[in-house]
Image (cartoon, grey):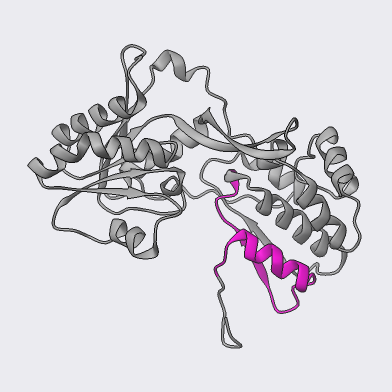
Amino acid sequence: ASARTRLLVCTEGVFLRRLQDDPFLEDVAAVVFDEFHERSLDSDLALAMVRRVRNEVRPDLRVVVMSATLAPAPIAQYLGGCPTVESAGRTYPVAVEYQRFSSNEPLDRQAADGVRAMCERTDGDVLCFLPGVGEIRRTQDLLARDAEERDWALLPLYGDLSLDEQQRVLRPLAQRKVVLATNVAESSLTIPGVTAVVDSGLCRELRFDRGRGIDVLELERISLASATQRAGRAGRTGPGVCYRLWTAGEERSLPARTTPDVERVDLAGPALLVRAFGGRDPRTFGWFEMPPPAALEAGEEVL
């Protein structure tokens, strides 16, 4: 960023730090929150801070909240009854298929079988969603011989990969790509050429363990909103197919949305940020969705 910058794209964490240093956002005309349905703790904090700044000192500041799956009414009400704009966009149809019966096979075997089936039925690249690096590596081992015999580029994708390794996934290749990815491919990155998605239906989420006093990663079912996001990755450049590693009956038990960070993680850090932001009380801060009072009390006690 420089004096010539007109558009700045940054992570929510970087923007949150900027709000701490420059709470009035004096050189900013508009703030856009994209993919807000992910409901990260940083995005919830940043939106609440921007809303307060707009209400108290910057009525000229424009705020836009965007999402492909978020229900617009609650956020519009939170932002003072702001107008909503719907854009259908240009997407291609994605056929969604399910397992006929529940399987007791290990997840890596189910995923590998799903990838093989999608490679037989489609011509484009295949994206397989798995909950973590361990599952990715085990599935990669199971598919190694297939990749060699059929000339696939078998590529892992997760947050800790080097930039070069992540960019290789995004670049066009002469070989057919089979990408084994965590949630990083759900909305943060778009992989061109994907015509089939294999969805494990699982992810790892941080949850606060009160007994140990720390956040821990737990294996959980994804929400219907996440499943919709994942399936849509197969319809970016043409018609596609999504194969879900669960039955249609099991889908009825999935939650409608992903539990926001603010409802499940340690709030000591966020409470400190709120108190540093003009000495605000976290209990009267004006959250989009109020955190559990007991969690806030526990965070305050730690501080």
Give whichever of 77, 101 is nearer the camera.
Answer: 101
Asked if one can make out residue 125 in the rendered structure from this viewpoint, the answer is yes
Residue at 58% x, 35% y is 258
The outermost residue toward the left is 149
Q: Quadrant of the N terminus?
A: bottom right
User: Would residue 41 be counted in the magenta stretch?
Assistant: no
Asked if one can make out residue 129 in the rendered structure from this viewpoint, the answer is no
Residue 176 in the image: above or below residue 199: below
The outermost residue toward the front is 212
Give percent across and percent down for residue 33: 61, 57
Left or right: where 283 falls relative to 119: right
Residue 176 in the image: above or below residue 58: above
Left or right: where 114 falls relative to 219: left
Residue at 63% x, 45% y is 39
User: Would residue 11 be counted in the magenta stretch?
Assistant: yes
Give percent across and percent down for residue 72: 63, 42
Residue range highlighted in magenta: 9-37
Give percent across and percent down for residue 93: 31, 37
Give percent across and percent down for residue 60: 76, 70
- Within the image, what quadrant is residue 160 found in? bottom left
- Within the image, what quadrant is residue 75 found in? top right
Left or right: where 111 falls relative to 214: left
Q: Please state the total of marks drawn on the protein image.
A: 0
Residue at 53% x, 28% y is 220
Give whichever of 282, 165 is nearer the camera.
Answer: 165
